[in-house]
Image (cartoon, grey):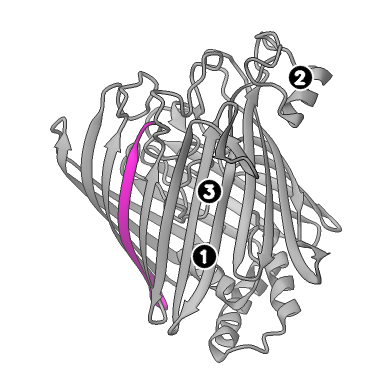
Amino acid sequence: MFDDRYRYIINELKFCGVDVSIVDSLISVGAINYEIKKNNFKQSQSCIRLVESIEGMMQEKLESPINTISIQAGNSKNYLQDKSNRLNESSGISISTEKALDKIAYKIKITKMNNGSNTNFDGSFVTFKNKNHVINLGRFHNWWGSSDNTSLILSNFSRPMPTVEYKNYRPYSINILSRNIALNYSLFIKQFESNREVPNALLLGNRLSIQPFKNLEISLIRVAQFGGKGRNINSEVIKNLILGSDNAGSELSKEDESGNQIAGLDFNYYTNVSNHKIKIYGQIFGEDGLDPIIDGKIFGAIFPSKRFKQIGFSVGVGKDIKITFENTSSDSGYANAVYNHYIYKNGYRYFDKPLGFNLDADSDQKLLNAEVVFDESFFKIQYSKNNINKNMSDNNFWSNSSMKFEEISLRYTRYLGSLEFNLTGFKRFNTHPHSNENLFLLNATYRY
């Protein structure tokens, strides 16, 4: 929905105390606008200027339909996709139209790629709003993660799945111990493809985000595969799924057990230190049953077992530069447990690509990047060190053997009025097994 410039600005609003947790649907433009006006911005001059810079974009998206024609030259199958607009797997052309009204928003997008695949409607959706309730229908991504680079639970590395989603429009506010705490929630059901071990399986996801302080947000997240051809879907299965009483060993038949459950949390902490905007963030998830993480005589804490995690740190340098360091691992310490399951043998993947971490299961990534925002352009340079499929799973998207590589990637976007040009490239080196790989992509978009 938002190009890199506006996404950068919207993220910066967090440092001004504006709740912008839900910005993954077009109609949320209105919610952001509401939060801006609610704060009145009797704050620092930098926050006032930030709000002034985004108000024109808000008005444009709320008043005028946006039509685009986009052409991509190059193959992006093995590109480490970040939160920016997703690149198609191969060269092709897309056309789209989108509009946000008071109670409805929509986007219709048609893509035809040159690899012989059928025309698809990835990225198309319709959103309905009634008071503080929102329903989204279509093929769209839910990016559930604190990082702008990748997410362990839901990213845009795979194609978007058919989805029905229910969530709030503006944050709820509850008073606990004389403190107003903001709440956001999201609940969805997605459907997997038919050409898999259990055809047309379903994915249930729910997320509750709590903001106890203006600069701290914590989200509780759970996803679970269930249903599909030959699998039971009845009231008992749904009840056990919602209550979490559906793990192996809970006296359920194999037909009634859902599979590939993942649960955990992510967090974002924002602060200003000597005029530097600092964000500390992370995720921790687990598969299967509960397991103590604090096992004491006086108090204890439990969490899903077979845990995997991410930790990251970013700092704003000057007005328009952000530097980020991130360490992500989908290795739980149990071979081939993450994203895999004995019932849903294709695992937590859609058309073979993982729904979460772009390196798939049992993999590690360390990255360092810098982003620079100019008036009419955006630039990102990134170094990453990647260790993939350490336990040599046959289901891993990248390879059925382990592999390592380091990578330097560049992304440059230039805005020229109604035209947008995006250049993306990477160079991989120190690869094992040896395979020198380079990529260069050009994407051109015309908006009218």
Which residue is farthest right? 131
Mark 3 vs mark 1: in front = 1
Quarter of the rendering occupied by the C terminus = bottom right
Q: Most prominent secondary structure in the magenta stretch?
A: strand
Q: Amino acid at mark 1?
A: Arg
Please provide percent x and percent y for residue 63.
70, 69
Q: CA distance from mark 3 to mark 1?
A: 22 Å
Q: Quadrant of residue 235?
A: top right
What label sits on residue 237 in the rendered view?
Answer: 2
Residue 324 vs 92, above or below: the answer is below
Q: Secondary structure at mark 3?
A: strand
Q: Nearer the viewer, residue 257 or 22?
A: 257
Q: Secondary structure at mark 2?
A: helix
Question: Mark 1: few, some, or many residues within 10 Å (few <14, many ≥20)?
Answer: some
Q: Earlier in the sequence, mark 3 or mark 1?
A: 1
Point 49% across, 53% down: residue: 282
Dot 2 or dot 1: first in sequence order is: 1
Report the residue at 75% width, 49% height from top.
167
Asked if residue 411 can be seen in this view, the reply is no
Q: Residue 351 appears at what percent x and percent y?
A: 47, 26
Pointer 3: residues within 10 angstroms few (<14), some, or many (20+)?
some
Identify the disc placed on residue 95.
3
- Residue 384, relative to residue 240: is it above or below? below
- Amino acid tagged 2: Val
